[in-house]
Amino acid sequence: MSVLEAKHVRKVFKEEKNETLALDDVNFTVENGEFVLLVGPSGCGKSTMLRIIAGLEHATSGEVIFEGKPITQPNPKISMVFQLFGLLPWKTAEENVEVPLEILGFQKKERAEAAKSYLKMVHLEGFENTYPHDLSGGMKQRVGIARALALKPDILLMDEPFSSLDELTAKTLRDLTLSIWRKKDEPPDSILMVSHNVEEAVYIADRVIVMSGRPGHVVGDVKIDIPRPRSEHIRDPIYFHFVDEVMEMLNVGSEKR
Ligand code: ADP
């Protein structure tokens, strides 16, 4: 069953006399339990699509169905990890994780307990009282992940979460995210991640949805049939086969536009 279904999503940004068609008839699904990567060139509307799913932006036409109902506003069962972390600099790591719980009305004791346990899950024990400016990029993103997990989302949205990190840190956080997702008795069931990195997509995803350049439109949907852990297969021909297949779709998609 689909947890999420984008149906004919179109988005036009209007600014004074200028109109930008960012998304043009975007259709895709995320099934329950799936880890899906949405890839496409810069500016093709990937972030816009995630923001519509998060209820932070409205589609001009079309709709996104979440667990059977159209999304009209933010929903705590859908949480988001941002490219540039989105931490509040005047709050400690623990206080940052507490922010969405505070908005939802959780009491201090419960918030603090949840924040500690999710910071532990992302291996940040001992950094609860540290402020963002004393954390590395990778550690900031661990806080961002803990904050999103604390909402116990059914689906986690991740907007280029590792693209501002060095490759070694990015790899560690990819594996951490995979291990969190694979714990089937704990949220989130499903993850939808945006990336412009095809190798990252093939490393992580059950399925890669390929978008063309602006206006964003789905040009491919590829099931990645490589056993996990994929770190054991990154030199196998099958890995390169999938990277090539997705690359080819990206190239054809951008030539047609
Ligand atoms: P991506 O995430 O794939 O890089 P974005 O979703 O950020 O793409 O942007 C898609 C297009 O929509 C771009 O041309 C961008 O300039 C435009 N856009 C995004 N947000 C806004 C906005 N708030 N106002 C006007 N144009 C926007």
Image: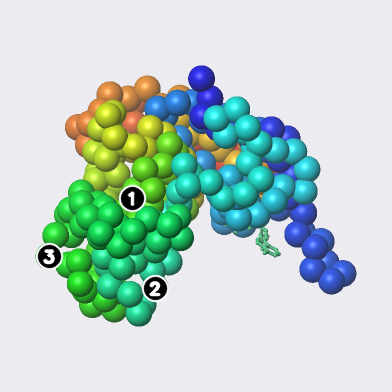
Where residue 29 sits: x, y (%)? 57, 29
Residue visible at 25% across and 70% down in the picture: 136
CB atoms at circles 3 and 2 under 8 Å apart?
A: no
Residue contact between numbered discs 1 and 3, judged by CB atoms under 8 Å = no
Identity of the residue drawn at 24% across and 46% down = 176
Residue that appears at 37% across and 55% down: 106
Residue 226 in the image: above or below residue 85: above
Ligand 1 visible in quadrant:
bottom right
Pick whichever of labels 1 and 3 is earlier in the sequence: 3
Residue 156 percent coordinates (x, y): 43, 43
9 left or right of 32 in image:
right
Q: Which mark is residue 150?
A: 1
Label 3 Cα crowd, 10 Å radius (few <14 / some 14-19 / many 20+): few
Q: Which residue is mark 2?
A: 88
- The answer to which of 106 and 157 lies nearer the viewer is 106
User: In screen coordinates, is 222 left or right of 127?
Assistant: right
Q: Position of residue 201 (x, y in %)?
A: 41, 40
